[in-house]
Amino acid sequence: MSLAEFPCLAKAQSCLARAGWPVGTCRDYEEPQILGNLRSPPWRVGMARRVFFSFHYQRDVWRINQIRNLTEIIGTAAAGFQDASLWEEAKKKGDANIKKMIDAALYNTSVTVVFIGNMTAGRKFINYEIEKSIARDNGIVGVQIHHLKNHEGEIDMAGRTPALLTSNNLPVYKYTDQDALKKYIEAAAKKVGK
């Protein structure tokens, strides 16, 4: 896999780097047998865990940006966290391009956090993200965020839990603080042996 295959990912990594996030190329996260003497699993970079954050970008990115800066966690998202143009550009190119962005963001993650806002369950790609996370044996946890303030200082009504979380008996918690979120992430990873 190379960044040339995912121009939107390259742009997202550039935005993340400008924001001070530790980013690398896909080569930095290749499988251990390719790298040889890799000391930690591919879903770990140093001591940080790579986690895919699934959320409703247009409605909830402000809420996610309030909580995503966790120590020992490197969060990824299909369209990054800062640049809405990445998502809009991908939408214009069609569903296959969006699925490529999701697949690239899931690469070498060990846990998927589905942040549940008011409209998350109705998102077009929520089931794809959860199905792909299950297929790659990611630990999965749902976290309600509707009660966090948006960019206008407003909270939202609780939304439905995505059906695939419920049907797979995956845990769902209400966000309280970063320490609790880290515990949910580690518990989900431990449940699947990662």
Image (tube, helix red, strand yellow):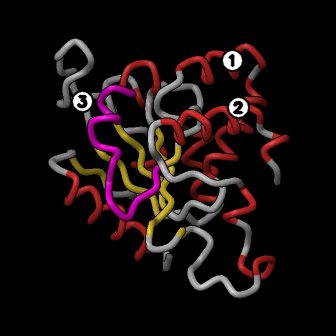
Mark 2: secondary structure:
helix
- Compare residues 169 and 52 and report the one nearer the observer: 52
Q: State the residue position of label 3.
A: 146
Q: Residue at x 69, y 46 (%)?
A: 103
The amino acid type, in three-letter code, at marker 2 is Cys
Which numbered disc, 3 or 1, marks the residue that appears first in the sequence? 1
Compared to residue 189, the image places residue 142 above or below, namely: above
| Amino acid type, label 1 | Glu
* Residue 135, magenta (yes or no): no
Which numbered mark, 2 or 3, is in the foreground of this view?
2
- Quadrant in the picture for residue 95: top right
Q: Residue 44 appears at what percent x and percent y?
A: 53, 70
The one of 20 and 125 positioned closer to us in this rendering = 20
Q: Decide: few, some or many residues near mark 1? Use Cα within 10 Å; few <14, some 14-19, many ≥20.
A: some
Instruction: Tell me: residue 158, above or below residue 4.
Output: above
Which mark sits nearer the N-terminus, 2 or 3?
2
Q: Are marks 2 and 3 in contact (CB under 8 Å)?
A: no
The one of 50 and 111 positioned closer to us in this rendering: 50
Question: If you read the primary sequence from the N terminus, does the residue marked by circle 1 or circle 2 appear first?
Answer: 2
Magenta region, residue range: 61-75
SS at mark 1? Answer: helix
- Label 2, on which residue? 8
Residue at numbered disc 1:
89
